[in-house]
Amino acid sequence: NAGVTQTPKFQVLKTGQSMTLQCAQDMNHEYMSWYRQDPGMGLRLIHYSVGAGITDQGEVPNGYNVSRSTTEDFPLRLLSAAPSQTSVYFCASSFGQSSYEQYFGPGTRLTVT
Amino acid sequence: GDSVTQMEGPVTLSEEAFLTINCTYTATGYPSLFWYVQYPGEGLQLLLKATKADDKGSNKGFEATYRKETTSFHLEKGSVQVSDSAVYFCALRGRTSGSRLTFGEGTQLTVNP
């Protein structure tokens, strides 16, 4: 199993540009989520999904969209990038809502200039 | 709402020193508690967990005990190694939060030979 994969590893955007961060898992996990990691603030939940076709907002959803058309994929879209979205983004998955362990991808480092 | 507070870092120790990283939490009811570790350039990995009061989680020589009376989950290791250098995150999952995790701000640990 590849586990949780994320692409790209690094990305630089200009303010106002849009892009999609990709996340995929091959463990047939129901639950997937996106976090952003900022210095001194730990990880904050952006959006999550409890299964294909179902998504919901986390703590900091503004400026981001998600969809979950398949169990495997959970892309994160930035519609109009802002410097405040400069961060490291992590995708995570788990078997279900009651599962204790979440599996994290290696992260995408995004810089918005 | 739920919150996690970790001791401020960074922490620098010599090899074989004793490690304590403090973690306290605020949550409704009795959450599950976790320590995650992030090695340089990687995503987060579950280090240990405790799901009820007085449980002790342990892994790779690290331990943490769920203390309801002090709402704490301090991470300890008796003798650290250079390979333990990483960022450590305390996290909780509330009883009604599904798989949603609330993270502390993280503590950078550097172990020198």
Image: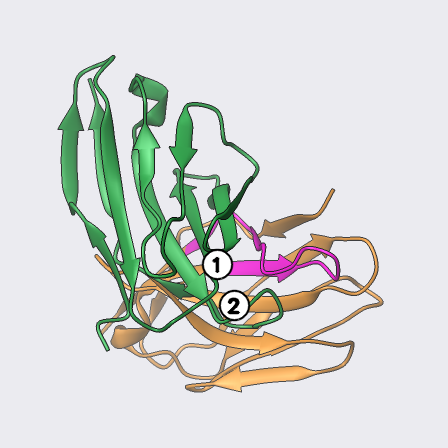
Chain colours: A green, B orange
Residue A24 percent location from the top left of the image: 28, 58
Q: Which mark is residue B35?
A: 2
Tell whether A47 sits left or right of A107: right
For residue B95: magenta? yes
> What is the quadrant of residue B22 in the picture?
bottom right
- A21 to B44, vertically: above or below: above
Task: Look at mark 1 in the image and give the residue it sits on.
Answer: B89
User: The C terminus of chain B appears in which quarter of the rendering?
Assistant: bottom left
Task: Identify which residue is drawn at 30% across, 41% down.
Answer: A88
| Cβ atoms under marks 2 and 1 closer than 8 Å | yes
Q: Nearer the viewer, residue B58 or A23?
A: A23
Q: Which mark is residue A89?
A: none
Please provide the residue range marked out in magenta: B90-107
Name the element at disc 1. Answer: strand
Task: Identify which residue is drawn at 75% across, 62% down.
Answer: B95
SS majority, magenta: loop
Q: Nearer the viewer, residue A1 or A113?
A: A1
